[in-house]
Amino acid sequence: MEQLTLHPIPRLAGTVKLPGSKSISNRTLLLAALADGPTLVRELLDSDDIRRMLEALATLGVKVEQQGDSRDFLVHGTGGAFAVKDADLFLGNAGTAFRPLTAALALMQGNYHLHGVPRMHERPIGDLVDALRVAGADIRYLGNDGYPPLQIHPASISAGKIIPVKGNVSSQFLTALLMALPLTGESVTIEVVGELISKPYIEITLNLMARFGVTVQRDGWQRFTIAAGQRYRAPGEIHVEGDASSASYFLAAGALAGGPVRVEGVGRSSIQGDVKFADALALMGAEISMGDNWIEARAPQGGLNAIDVDLNHIPDAAMTIAVAALAAKGTTTIRNVESWRVKETDRLAAMATELRKVGASVVETQDSISITPPATLTANAEIDTYDDHRMAMCFSLVALLGTPVIINDPKCVAKTFPDYFEVLGKLAAN
Ligand SMILES: O=C(O)C1=C[C@@H](OP(=O)(O)O)[C@@H](O)[C@H](O)C1
Ligand SMILES: C=C(OP(=O)(O)O)C(=O)O
């Protein structure tokens, strides 16, 4: 197995241009593929999760043309029906490809086999399948009930009713329904049953749907109504913002190792909830400034303080807080992140195990984690990354605390940020 040794990085300052947002890239590709007419998608993220969506669309007969060597792609919309009616789709471990494609294809009168890596087959999808079955979809489980792989069959769809969906396992199920149900042309109300987690991701979905001409009437986070007869219309061009979750590693770096570190590509005008990571970092004492399209972080004079926070709204960037806690005075508690258990790995268990390797005292509950840093961090800890890009990226921050660290299987960052370590290295060389 490949290993990467990161030597201590005593001071870090500079500017990083962020890669495109994963959440916006995959939503935009699908909406553009479903729209009437062509859409130019600018600055698409280049990573495994996006490749899975691009490959799936190609298999489904959607024409997508890369513009030279750029990250600009012209997507030829299909008007809401893919030409290929029988397909086998491998979607890796990309939740933002698997869940929305399941919903869209379930409404399309074809035979589709959707599968992924072994971990994807352990990530739940039952709440989405249950909701789609209420609309008449014919979806069968090929392995364990409630989990991929799935086989979709042609079915008679009638969405003109209330579709209930549970939102306490993943917000991606509601996102998938919202994006797909306009394809029926009927009026439909989606009713969230119980609690909805990761709410800001729904705002990304609604924002992009609106740019493609479909508006949703909402009653808070409980009911979402799509009026009859709406179609996705190509908006001409969509520019993909920088990835706010990827920004978290560099902002934390600025807060830990002097700074200022500035990220470009997200800021005050971002539609991504993960920009709120900056608020959590500020709560720890970091000095944050923000413009429309940039955020900057620097270390406070007296070092960071521990915090006790509910980070349900930013589950991905919350992992970065867990590692930044190693530099904070006191015990940091991150609450309401049970969804960590069903992501790329069981992130609560993985985080607890690996933080202990660097010497932290950790208390893990079903939905929270408390971290108390040691007096001296353990040098050269070998961090296992569990094929989880975010484990690799957030544990790189240990090097910014003056402690060498070894990252096992560093290439797992390819899911969302293939050249993460090169970008970090360049910043460190400034
Ligand atoms: O909709 C999205 O783009 C995402 C939603 C979140 O998932 P959950 O809703 O499952 O928490 C997040 O963790 C994931 O990385 C991306
Ligand atoms: C949870 C994540 O990914 P996915 O889109 O596969 O759910 C993530 O990127 O942290």
Image (spheres, helix red, strand yellow):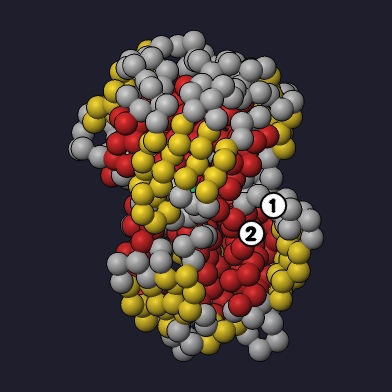
Is 116 located above or below residue 296 in the figure?
Answer: above
Please report the residue visible at 29 percent of the width from the left and 40 percent of the height from the top. Answer: 126
The amino acid type of the residue labelled 2 equals Val
Q: Which residue is mark 1?
A: 270
Please report the residue visible at 35 percent of the width from the left and 28 percent of the height from the top. Answer: 135
Q: Which residue is mark 2?
A: 275
Q: Can residue 63 be seen here?
A: yes
> Residue 356 location in percent, x, y?
36, 75
Position of 239 with respect to 130 (left or right) is: right
Depth check: give the residue in front, 249 or 306: 306
Please report the residue visible at 41 percent of the width from the left and 47 percent of the height from the top. Answer: 192
| Quarter of the figure with residue 298 | bottom right
> Looking at the image, is mark 1 or mark 2 earlier in the sequence?
1
The amino acid type of the residue labelled 1 equals Ser
> Residue 255 location in percent, x, y?
65, 74
Please report the residue visible at 54 percent of the width from the left and 25 percent of the height from the top. Answer: 228
Q: Can residue 119 be seen here?
A: no
Contact, CB < 8 Å: mark 1 with mark 2?
A: yes
Query: Which element is circle 1 on?
Result: loop
Depth check: give the residue in front, 196 or 244: 196
> Residue 180 location in percent, x, y?
48, 29
Mark 1 nearby-residue class (10 Å; few <14, some 14–19, many ≥20): some
Residue pushed farthest right? Answer: 291
Quadrant of the image containing the C terminus: bottom right
